[in-house]
Image (spheres, rainbow, N blue to C red):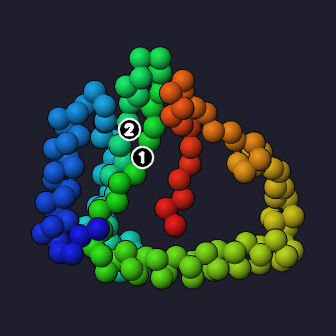
Amino acid sequence: TFNTVEQLLTGFHAFMHHIKGNSSIIELARVKNGFINTTERSSGYRDIKINVIYKSQNPMHRDVRMICEVQFLLINYLEEKRRIHKLYTILREEMFFQMVVSENAEQQRMKFEERLNVGKQVALSYDKKGVCFKSSVDSE
């Protein structure tokens, strides 16, 4: 997070320079600038999202890649994002509930089948040094 747009842009350019200088470790996948298309978001929230591909440096796992997202945002937007996220979660649950309980022909045709229960079916994997190389991080 950054206090000013100038600081945000400085951080963005420094990160892009870091990516270019470390292409054997990190590769740019996508940049999405939420400051450009203001009609897309009615909430007023803005950020820059950079998707990168980290490449394993472990000789035993050279083919391992991890897609990551780095968000560049102003501190005021982060505070707003945290506040709105709770409301968004409630709204999303309400929408799902309404979809499940209402009966129309299209929804009756939809069938939900559990394919993967992450909490029960995904184990963490560790290398020989005890470093976890498969995991999921919740930013909240």
Helix, strand or loop at mark 1:
strand
- Compared to residue 51, the image places residue 3 above or below, namely below
Rendered residue at 84%/55% (across/down)? 111
Q: Which quarter of the figure has residue 40?
A: bottom left
- Residues 36 and 24: in front is 24
Distance of label 2 from label 1 (alpha carbons): 6 Å
Q: Is residue 6 found left or right of 66 in the rendered image? A: left
Q: Of 41 and 69, which appears nearest the observer?
A: 69
* Marker count (numbered): 2
Q: Compared to 33, does 102 lie above or below?
A: below
Which residue is painted at 33% across and 52% down in the image? Answer: 50
Instruction: Please identify the quadrant where the N terminus is shown.
Output: bottom left
Is residue 44 depicted above or below 116 in this figure? Answer: below
Along the horizontal axis of the image, is 33 left or right of 54? Answer: left
Residue with the mark numbered 1: 68
Contact? badges 2 and 1 (CB < 8 Å)? yes
| Residue 111 in the figure: left or right of residue 92 | right
